[in-house]
Image: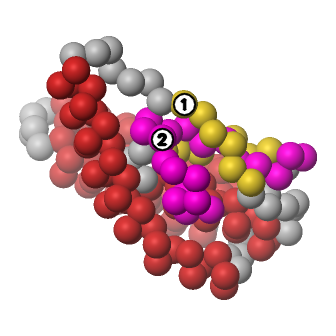
Amino acid sequence: MRAFLRWAVWWVVLALLWLLYQGEYNRIEPIAAASAAAIAATVGVAVRRQERAGLRLELGWAARARSVPWQVVREFVLVTLFLGRALRRRRTPPTGGFRTLAFPTGGGRPAERGRRVFAALAITYSPNSYVVDMDGDEQVVVVHTLSPVPPGRELL
């Protein structure tokens, strides 16, 4: 019963969001909203049932979250300038590059899983970079950046 209630709440929320974001109201949109919401809610409930692993964010890593908004603003300006220079020079669009950053990926404890989730979310909020992979053996995170970030200016 609890799973069905969770599914129904997600279905209503997702269907309303579909209609809100779509902005076009004809006979097809409510059907599309209901169908897409049903699929998404089903997948969400199924994933939640499969993964019951806990997450815990360590206080030291949570304190780093205060720098995320500044990182987003700083890297937005960086990307805007980078793309503006590329347009002015009329070159092909830049493709960016990959970097590896030292990061204590850890194992399967809730605090270590929380650290990996935090790092992936915090880095990916930035318009300049996103996490591609975390290597537990090498204790590194692989990040793709459009415009190079000077060493030491990363969130990690």
Q: Which residue is mark 1?
A: 97
**Residue 68 in sight here:** yes
Q: Position of residue 130 (x, y in %)?
A: 52, 44
Q: Position of residue 145 (x, y in %)?
A: 50, 39
- Magenta range: 137-156
> Mark 1 falls on what kind of element?
strand
Question: Magenta stretch: residue 145 in it?
Answer: yes
Question: Magenta stretch: residue 103 in it?
Answer: no
The residue at the point 49 percent across, 48 percent down is: 149
Q: Is residue 136 above or below residue 112?
A: above
Q: Amino acid at mark 2?
A: Pro
Marked residue nearer the N-terminal end (2 or 1): 1
Q: Write down the quadrant of residue 93 in the picture.
A: top left
What predominant SS class does the magenta segment belong to? Answer: loop
Q: Position of residue 8 (x, y in %)?
A: 45, 59
Q: Which residue is mark 2?
A: 148
Q: Nearer the viewer, residue 86 or 61?
A: 86
